[in-house]
């Protein structure tokens, strides 16, 4: 038996950050993110029933041995619930529309795309045990925690929280109690650094195990989830800006105070942050920043501030990006089966 399936799945940018675990791919606190549109991964999964299953991974058309161990471990973990996949050889072709491993959550889009392909295979084999997207989120989580949120569009919540009905540590859920201003939110990703970041997310999560501030961080994150729920409902952009910027700086503060410590921001990261904050005060707008675990800056702003954001980028921020590069993105509708 042979077959293939192809999915395109987006990256996401967390507003309240997932950082730290309390078990295998179980978040220490809940998180919520915007699903993006233009930053996505396209993955094709080809399968062949085989007595000697093999795995081959291609990135951008070239065989990539570096990704193979992570993908193999992913399939090995999934085989605990779906042993039938051990009967198949896999060939995976994947490509990104944005730089890999530089803090734009390539693992979120990549592992969610692979999980969606896997669910399509399991559906074809008539062994899928749960609703399609719920299981896709669960399987994506096994590969990358933040990937669990990329199987839905808009705002997506992951992790048990008393204020979010239906929330779970095992899969993400779409969140719909949202003021219209957030339906068209913009994200310009300022590419300060395009290369490999200095520490992987998995290592970074582990550093919180014995971190002196970890318990307080998890408490604050849960509180921020409650605050953000109200903000998303009432459209209070002043509070939104304050909360997401605090979350971004706290994430990097945790890395800087871990042992060993890591400084993931670069000088131009800080320069961009300062220029955004100064511009916001001078121009009566809601342009804000957030960061993933890397040097690049996500500049978030409502659609009403597009013209002001463009002026800020052209006049001040593009010069601080590597080769003047940045990506204009917006809140997206989620994955697409191709």
Image (tube, rainbow, N blue to C red):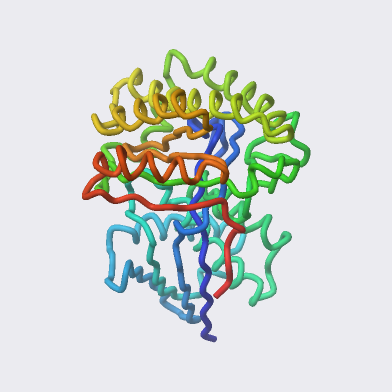
x, y percentage for residue 219?
Answer: 59, 19
Quadrant containing the N terminus in the rendered view: bottom right
Left or right, 317 with respect to 182, comes to: left
Residue 84 at what x, y percent from top left? Answer: 58, 70
State the residue at coordinates (51%, 69%): 86
Q: Residue 3, percent across and down?
A: 53, 83
Choose between 96 and 324: the one closer to the eye: 324
The answer to whether residue 204 shows anywhere in this view is: yes
Report the residue at 35% width, 57% height from top.
Answer: 69
Could you tell me which residue is drawn at 41 percent across and 31 percent down?
206
- The quadrant in which residue 162 appears is top right
Q: Quadrant of residue 39?
A: bottom left
User: Taking 111 as reference, is 54 left or right?
Assistant: left
Q: Is residue 217 left or right of residue 229?
A: left
Count of numbered marks: 0
Q: Quick one: which residue is furthest to the right in this view?
A: 165
Q: Is residue 171 visible?
A: no
Looking at the picture, how far across and down is residue 261, in whole percent? 29, 23
Residue closest to the eye, 118 or 282? 282
Q: Quadrant of the C terminus?
A: bottom right
- Left or right of residue 204, residue 265 in this image: left
Above or below for 189 versus 282: below
The foreground one among 75 and 301 is 301
In the image as oriented, which residue stretches furthest toward the bottom?
1
């Amino acid at each position: 038996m042979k077959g293939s399936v192809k999915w395109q799945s987006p990256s996401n940018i967390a507003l309240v950050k997932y950082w730290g675990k309390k078990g295998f791919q179980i978040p220490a606190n809940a998180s919520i993110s915007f699903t993006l549109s233009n930053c996505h991964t396209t993955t094709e999964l080809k399968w062949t029933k085989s007595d000697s299953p093999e795995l081959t991974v291609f990135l951008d058309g070239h065989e990539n041995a570096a990704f193979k161990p992570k993908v193999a471990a992913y399939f090995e973990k999934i085989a605990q619930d779906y042993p039938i996949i051990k009967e198949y050889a896999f060939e995976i072709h994947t490509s990104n529309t944005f730089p890999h491993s530089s803090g734009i959550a390539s693992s979120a889009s990549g592992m969610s795309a692979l999980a969606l392909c896997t669910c399509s295979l399991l559906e074809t084999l008539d062994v899928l045990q749960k609703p399609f997207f719920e299981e896709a989120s669960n399987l994506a989580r096994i590969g990358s925690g933040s990937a669990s949120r990329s199987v839905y569009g808009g705002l997506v919540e992951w992790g048990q929280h008393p204020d979010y009905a239906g929330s779970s540590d095992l899969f993400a859920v779409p969140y719909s109690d949202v003021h219209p201003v957030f339906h068209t939110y913009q994200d310009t990703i300022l590419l300060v650094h395009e290369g490999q970041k200095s520490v992987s997310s998995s290592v970074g999560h582990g550093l919180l195990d014995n971190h002196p501030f970890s318990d307080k961080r998890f408490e604050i994150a849960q509180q921020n989830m409650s605050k953000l729920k109200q903000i998303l409902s009432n459209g209070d952009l002043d509070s939104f800006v304050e909360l997401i910027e605090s979350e971004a700086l706290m994430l990097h503060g945790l890395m800087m105070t871990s042992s060993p410590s890591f400084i993931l921001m670069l000088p131009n990261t800080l320069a961009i942050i300062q220029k955004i904050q100064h511009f916001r005060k001078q121009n009566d707008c809601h342009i804000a920043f957030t960061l993933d675990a890397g040097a690049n800056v996500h500049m978030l702003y409502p659609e009403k501030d597009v013209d002001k954001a463009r002026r800020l980028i052209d006049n001040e921020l593009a010069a601080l990006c590597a080769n003047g590069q940045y990506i204009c993105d917006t809140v997206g509708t989620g994955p697409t089966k191709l």
